[in-house]
Amino acid sequence: MAPEKIESSRHSPARASLLARALSILDAVDLIRLGARIPLICKLTGLEHSTAKRLYRQIRGFHAPAGQAPFTDTWYLKSHQRMLHTTIIWRLFQAFEATSKAAARALIDIYGSYSQMVQNVLLDVTRAAFVPQLLAQGLWLEYRCEYCSLSFIGPENNVNKSCPACHLYHRFRCRLCCAAIEQRSTGRNRDICASCSARRKRRNPN
Ligand SMILES: [Zn+2]
Ligand SMILES: [Zn+2]
């Protein structure tokens, strides 16, 4: 057989599409193991619905739950902890953008990195996948933290001037001098320490 012939068959469209399909299936297997639902798997891998469903059943041992859970941003906004994890996911998406990886592989790697970075995983893979969509759809915007100057994301009508990490930090540290603050068990949380508060009162007695 002439060498040219081997070369041309190695790069034939049929082989290329077989390889592409095999890679899509491998990605789908990883996504199923991470807990992704069928619509997300099909969207990211391009696999047919029936193939994704069959794979799901074979891997998980039961039928895939029907449809996609309805999505709003309410879940993310429930706590600063969730918003902090959401910011981590968003930063990872930004870092992976430069690698020009396919969407499915990028999400698998981003979710893997996120799971290794945090002690308790708060976002499931579906919620992680939804983070860049919040920005792409213009529902969320990028802001700059007035305390640490790092960027963070939040809803269009965001009223928080500091990022989730600074919010959590200042729950236990004075906003003016960073001294530790003992929070009261009842009533509004203090945001400055007792000495800063006394100094402020001396300056503005009324
Ligand atoms: Zn900050
Ligand atoms: Zn203070």
Image: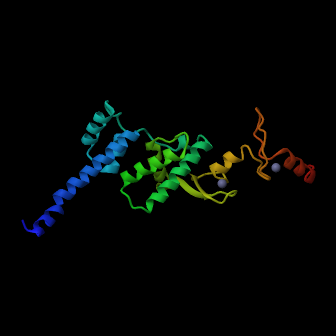
Residue 88 locus on image (x, y percent): 54, 51
Say which of 58 and 52 sits in front.
Answer: 58
Say which of 115 and 147 sits in front.
Answer: 115
Name the outermost residue toward the top.
62
Q: Quadrant of the N terminus?
A: bottom left
**For the point 62% across and 59% down, which residue is it?**
150
Q: Is residue 94 above or below residue 79?
A: below
Residue 129 locus on image (x, y percent): 44, 48
**For the point 69% across and 58% down, which residue is it?**
146
Residue 188 locus on image (x, y percent): 76, 38
**For the point 90% across and 52% down, which residue is it?**
204
Ligand 1 shows up in the quarter that is: bottom right
Name the outermost residue toward the left.
1
Q: Is residue 112 left or right of residue 54?
A: right
Classify residue 141 by image quadrant: bottom right
Can you see residue 36? no
What is the count of numbered marks? 0
Residue 171 locus on image (x, y percent): 71, 43
